Image: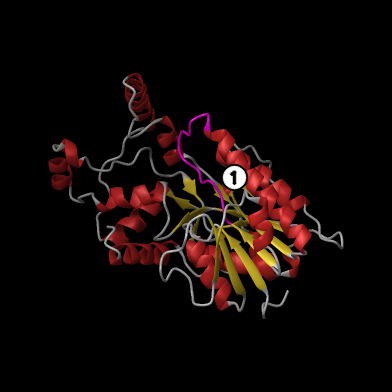
Amino acid sequence: MSEKNKLVLATGATGAIGPRVVHALCQAGYRICTFSVDAPESGMYPPNVEVVIGDVTDKAAVESAMQGVDAVVHMAALLHIVNPPPESREKYERINVGGTAVVVDAAIHAGVKRVVLFSTIAVYGQANRQVLNEMSPTHPDTFYAQAKLAAEKIVLNAKGADGQPLGTVLRLGAVYGSRIKGNYERLIHALAGNLGTRSQFLRKLGHASKLPFIPIGNGLNRRTLIYDKDVATAAVLAAGHSKAAGRIYNVSDGHYHTMNDIIKVICKALDRDPPVFKLPVCPAYVVTGIVEDLMKMLGRASPIGRKTIEKFTEDIAVDSSRIRNELGFLPQYDLVSGWLETVEKMRDRGEI
């Protein structure tokens, strides 16, 4: 599909990755219509981007926005949170599964040529120290991942009038960047508040209101990351490449990073020394569990729980060679350059 004069509908474009994707699509020559529940901030998008306010679960609104669209980049979703309450399952299914069904159905009826779904490597579940690829079995173990896998099936089953597949699934590694929320945002703020030397660390440890960040485990567990600008590049390729139809692609920077490496790179970008102590996993898990249970008995939320430790120490290495080999995807940011730019932009906004 040639980019010239083609119209792309970008759902969820006010989210953490959305503006990056919109800018990349504009630079590639597409006309853009965004569809989000929130109005964009001033200057969030390039000029001439059409903005539609709406909910992806609203069939009439989605059908209206879909008119004349050539491709959809579907980013709208309820994102992962640690320890979601049981009642949130319905919301994940309504938005992430039901909303995807509405978008795909409207796309089919409007004659759209490509639907790109942003999914997650979380659909694989526990990696068990193996390197996973697109052929690996999926065992999603969270509401978010389960809903995303269900959404993938909807997209991959979609066919156009010619019987050809419409959908492409991008399973994103852990995305980081200056707008990202969640675990990596918390990590960078924790490291930004740390003092590096041993004496400074011990002095800070004596102030309950300024507790330092202490990593848990040996830090050798692997993680699969991708910078937000490279996610946008992958989205452009998936929207326009003829080979992408009907395919699933893992998206990462092409490397497996240990937690130690990630912390060191972030600390270097922050001009901080890395933490000087580490906590063994088992004692930390036991103590955290006691605190979590006690806070629950008191009717209060615990600042850290068992799931937090499990997330910090999990090992997940995912191969992303397929998107490089089939679509020519080449990440432009490695771990160092990505975190340097992230820290710079967060500092410019006064966030760290």
Dividing the picture into quadrants, the one containing residue 302 is top left
Is 248 on the left-hand or right-hand side of 229? right
| Residue 319, image x, y percentages | 61, 54
The residue closer to the viewer here, 130 or 25, is 25
Query: Which span is picked out in magenta?
Result: 75-87
Q: Residue furthest right?
A: 162
Q: Which residue is mark 1?
A: 95
| The C terminus sits in image quarter | bottom left
Q: Is residue 140 above or below residue 325?
A: above
Is 25 on the left-hand or right-hand side of 288? right
Q: In the rendered image, is residue 329 in sight?
A: no
The structure residue drawn at horizontal position 62% and vertical position 75%, both measured from the top left corner, is 30
Mark 1, residues whose alpha carbon is within 10 Å: few (<14), some, or many (≥20)? many
Q: In the rendered image, is residue 238 in sight?
A: yes
The structure residue drawn at horizontal position 57% and vertical position 34%, both measured from the top left corner, is 89
Give yes or no for residue 77 being in the magenta stretch.
Answer: yes
The residue closer to the viewer here, 170 or 276, is 170
Residue type beneath disc 1? Ile
